[in-house]
Amino acid sequence: MLVAGEASGDKHGAALAKALQRLYPDFQFDFFGSGGSEMRAAGVETLVDVRDVGIIGVLEVARALGRLYRAYRKLVAAAIARKPAAVVLIDWPDFNLRLARRLSRLKFRITYYISPQVWAWRTHRVKAIKKYVDRMLVILPFEEEFYRGAGVEAQFVGHPLAGSVVADASPAEFARKHSLDPSKLTIALLPGSRPSEIHYHLPIMLEAAESLTASSRDEGSADLSSLPRFPADEIQFVVPVASTIPAEQIDRMIAAANSPVKSIRNDTYNALAYSKLAVVASGTATVEAALLGTPMIVIYRGSELSYRLIRPLIKLNTFAMVNLIAGKRIVPELIQGHATGKNIARTIYTILSDAQQRAAMKADLELVRARLLEGGTDASERAARAVMRMATA
């Protein structure tokens, strides 16, 4: 049983299922649980689809409680009926820790792959993990020591993206495939993989893109008219669409904003690799950009009430995973009230106008990449072996 609730978990769950089949070809696997298109392609029967449950924010979760509870009941019932040899919970802590409590009480052995960031906020959750999770499979080196210090059995398996985030086309091939101009500076806009993230992030990203192009000078808002701009023949924007978001929704929002932005599908890594800069919603995509060496601006915005409720629980002064891994702020962060079209546009202009700043950022990102590679490039296989030991114990 594999349970993921968002696009990144879908990717990691698919890689885990493939690794199990590859390493143990003599076994007949029956995978089921929660996931998305990538897990389905890997042979997982998804009783719950990540597009229906990928929700973040206190208010957003409250509005979706009925949907989440139905998903919870469906997964518990499936576990009882099908009696899986192993239960693997993948990230998605608010849902999965509740599921872990129920399934642990039903005597299922629980493996948790990709840790909640309990070392950053809501540290009390480590008590529930100790009680209901049999083994943590963690992807950052310091997490193993953290959990063992708390009395939780943990194994560092490496980061699952370390060996898989690569560009597989040349810049010319990428430009030709998506009808882009290879002579222009490309900026990638990655608003996130959840509907709420698209709602809060994409409009301000589109506003920033519109404000930075000289061709839209007369059409921009008065609030943005004083910002510096690039000639329209020098810059272009792309939005790589997450698999959990309908591409048509993104295209409608771009069209409604009359923004000089092009959406692209199924080509995120090439888009990041060949962009001069990326504006990225805080999350897994920041790690992908770091592995590709792409300078970035990290943003995050949600409902004001959700932010006010959650912020006091966060014990760190930085949000972006790349900054946490680096141990210092190496990329700019625009969070909540600071995440506006105006601020994004100004920060883009500042970074693109300062070659020295970009070079320093790329050097720091290379150090982050080295740390991510400390565990090797076979995280999915290490995780698969650990899951198999649990299943056959």
Image: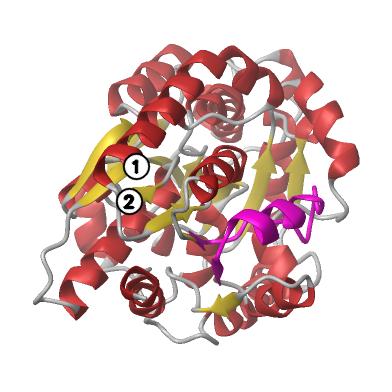
Q: Is the residue 321 above or below the residue 359 in the image?
A: above
Residue in the image at 72% along x and 21% along y = 303
**Amino acid type, mark 2:** Met
The location of residue 59, given as percent across then percent down, is 68, 18
Q: Is residue 105 left or right of residue 239?
A: right
Q: Is residue 128 magenta?
A: yes
Q: Nearer the viewer, residue 132 or 370?
A: 132
Q: Is the residue 287 above or below the residue 116 in the image?
A: below
Q: Is residue 105 visible?
A: yes
Q: Nearer the viewer, residue 289 or 127?
A: 127
| Image marks 1 and 2: residues in contact by CB distance under 8 Å | yes
Residue range (magenta): 111-137
Residue in the image at 50% along x and 78% along y = 158
**Amino acid type, mark 1:** Ala
Q: Quadrant of the C terminus?
A: bottom left
Q: Is residue 90 left or right of residue 60?
A: left
Q: Which residue is mark 1?
A: 79
Q: Is residue 11 left or right of residue 348?
A: left
Describe the colour scheme in one phrase: secondary structure
The location of residue 280, given as percent across then percent down, is 57, 47
Disc 1 is placed on an element classified as helix
Q: Which residue is mark 2?
A: 1
Residue in the image at 84% along x and 47% along y = 314
Q: Nearer the viewer, residue 64 or 286?
A: 64
Q: Is residue 35 visible?
A: no
Q: Nearer the viewer, mark 1 or mark 2?
A: 1
